[in-house]
Image: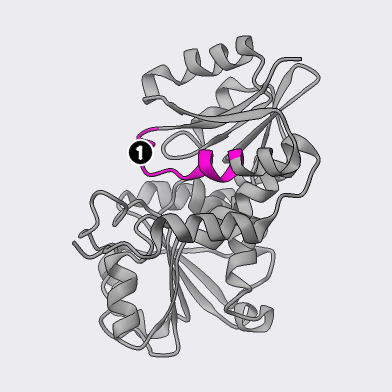
């Protein structure tokens, strides 16, 4: 019986710990599988997905910048992925490639470790970015009915598309960066969904911390570096922080279960990520 092939599609992929995390769980659970990185620029995405079909891949994850465009090259979408408009997990089901999205629920599970459901419901939330990850996060948060969600993106048109996509379940606001930063004192949770600050560009800064209230939470979906410059400055200002490792582990565990039908050891997955990243000097 051939080895089960899984992997991650994106570009670039040098930062990803997904292979280590999944391959360790295959070994622990006795699954004859292998998880591989498939670095695919946008112009190669269609051919790459077709190649994975022909290789008989059991599924794959999708990351930046393909979470929206991948919909064009698979056979169907799970209702939640269709609702979000982005896919981060593909599963081969009866020779069809079916798209799912585990990002939103994975993020929410990590957020609930530091904020209660009541706190989320009463929160004014700022989401920085409007890509596939932002869509998933906004969708998951909208289902919990927070006080407000404001989306800011470099291209405002893309933020408007996100707003319109979810308008039947949430009254999402779109704001220009300058306007939103002037209201920093209003936000209870600030979430960076962009790649700004990701290794190797670790000195980049996605959002001003000026006038952010001390009771707020600054949350970054990035997990490499373990603590981005933005989160470091927030922590040193006395603001609670949440990095992307919990979302990364949770979304990966949910995808793993889709592929294998087995529940992986999330604590072991989290420990592996921490062992690889936590002690590094992220400021240099």
Q: Residue furthest top?
A: 54
Q: Nearer the viewer, residue 60 or 71?
A: 60
Q: Is residue 89 above or below residue 140?
A: above
> How many other residues sit within 10 Å of disc 1, few (<14), some (14-19) or many (≥20)?
few
The answer to whether residue 141 is visible is no
| Coloring scheme used | one colour
Left of 27 or right of it: where is 244? left
Q: Please state the horizontal and vertical placement of residue 2, each as a whole percent of the image.
A: 71, 15
Q: Nearer the viewer, residue 72 or 116?
A: 116
User: Does the stretch in magenta take in 15?
Assistant: yes
Q: Name the residue carrying label 1.
A: 14
* Quarter holding residue 137: bottom right
What residue do we see at 76% from left, 15% from top? 1
Of the 4 image quadrants, the one containing the C terminus is: bottom left
The answer to whether residue 131 is visible is yes
Segment tinted magenta in the rendering: 11-23
Q: Please state the horizontal and vertical placement of residue 236, each as a whole percent of the image.
A: 29, 84
Q: Secondary structure at mark 1?
A: loop
What residue do we see at 27% from left, 62% from top? 282
What residue do we see at 48% from left, 47% from top? 161
What residue do we see at 62% from left, 9% from top? 54
Q: Please state the horizontal and vertical placement of residue 200, each as a whole percent of the image.
A: 25, 49
Left of 263 or right of it: where is 243? left
User: Does the stretch in magenta take in 168?
Assistant: no
Q: Is residue 150 above or below residue 196?
A: below
Q: How many marks?
A: 1
Q: Please state the horizontal and vertical placement of residue 4, each as a whole percent of the image.
A: 68, 24
């Amino acid at each position: 019986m051939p080895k089960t092939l899984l992997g991650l599609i994106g570009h670039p992929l040098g930062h990803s710990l997904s292979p280590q995390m999944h391959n360790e769980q295959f070994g622990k659970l006795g699954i004859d599988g292998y998880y591989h990185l498939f670095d695919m620029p946008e112009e190669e995405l269609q051919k790459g997905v077709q190649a994975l079909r022909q290789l008989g891949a059991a599924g794959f994850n999708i990351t930046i910048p393909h979470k929206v465009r991948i919909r064009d090259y698979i056979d169907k979408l799970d209702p939640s992925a269709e609702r979000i408009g982005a896919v981060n997990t593909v599963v081969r089901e009866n020779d069809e490639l079916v798209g799912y999205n585990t990002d939103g629920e994975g993020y929410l599970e990590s957020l609930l470790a530091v904020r209660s459901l009541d706190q989320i419901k009463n929160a004014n939330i700022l989401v920085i970015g409007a890509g596939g990850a932002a869509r998933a996060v906004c969708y998951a948060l909208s289902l919990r009915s927070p006080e407000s969600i404001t989306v800011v993106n470099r291209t405002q048109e893309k933020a408007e598309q996100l707003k319109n996509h979810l308008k039947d379940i949430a009254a999402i606001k779109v704001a220009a960066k300058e306007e939103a930063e002037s209201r920093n004192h209003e936000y209870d949770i600030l979430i960076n969904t962009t790649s700004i600050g990701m290794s190797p560009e670790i000195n980049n800064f996605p959002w001003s911390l000026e006038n952010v209230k001390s009771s707020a939470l600054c949350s970054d979906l990035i997990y490499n570096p373990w603590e981005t410059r933005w989160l470091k400055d927030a922590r040193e200002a006395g603001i609670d922080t949440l990095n992307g490792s919990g979302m990364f582990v949770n979304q990966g565990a949910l995808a793993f279960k889709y592929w294998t039908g087995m529940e992986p050891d999330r604590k072991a997955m989290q420990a592996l990520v921490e062992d690889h990243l936590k002690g590094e000097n992220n400021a240099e």
